[in-house]
Image (spheres, rainbow, N blue to C red):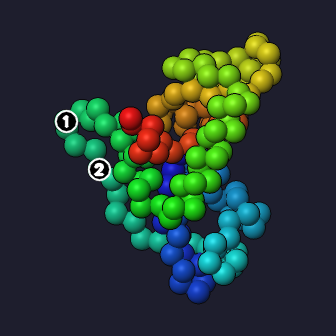
Amino acid sequence: MIKYSLVCEKEHDFEGWFGSSADYDKQRKRGFVECPHCGSKKISKALMAPRVAGTKKSTDGPSRVMANVAPQLPEEVVTKIREIKQHIEKNSENVGDKFPEEARKIHYGESEARGIYGKASVEEAIELAEEGVNVVPIPELPEDKN
């Protein structure tokens, strides 16, 4: 997944997550990207500082990144994320760390089609999205760490 800082013609700043750079371009050209503040579809990428990897290997992973994002979200958004997670857990099968493997099997018809959830690294989620596997990352919330 790629996160872009975006800006509309009225200079409203917001962020968007996309499967790839080409995915962003396709969605914008088709009018699917719009400003959440005013609804404008005249969107462009804002100037962003690149995230440069250091020489030290990071063990933070996606869960650390998501845990840092969640407390900054408005409470009503966090509440909705909780509701979505509860619905997924109630109506889907937890395949744990085997999520990427099982998602591919379902996508390619090698396994029974059903709702699943589990764990995947950012790299694995990007690979799945690039293959056309329909995946939706759900951020970890503070209570997920307890």
Residue 108 position in % (x across, y down): 76, 20
Q: Which quadrant of the figure has residue 53?
A: top left
Total labels drawn: 2
Is there any visible trace of residue 133 in the rendered image? no
Q: Amino acid at mark 2?
A: Val
Q: Residue sitting at 58 percent across and 46 percent down?
A: 82
Q: Amino acid at mark 1?
A: Lys
Front position in the image: 16 or 64: 64
Residue linked to disc 2: 52
Q: Relative to residue 72, is residue 19 drawn left or right?
A: right
- Percent coordinates x, y for residue 102 in the rendering: 65, 18
Instruction: Tell me: 106 left or right of 63.
Output: right
The correct choice, above or below, for 133 with respect to 102 in the image is below
Closer-to-camera residue (136/109):
136
Q: Can residue 110 be seen at all in this image of the molecule?
A: yes
Q: Is residue 91 above or below residue 77?
A: above
Q: Assess disc 2: are there few (<14), some (14-19) or many (≥20) residues with their C-alpha within 10 Å of its C-alpha.
A: few
Residue 56 falls left or right of residue 131: left
Q: Nearer the viewer, residue 82 or 113?
A: 82
Depth check, front residue: 111 or 50? 111
**Residue that label 1 marks:** 56
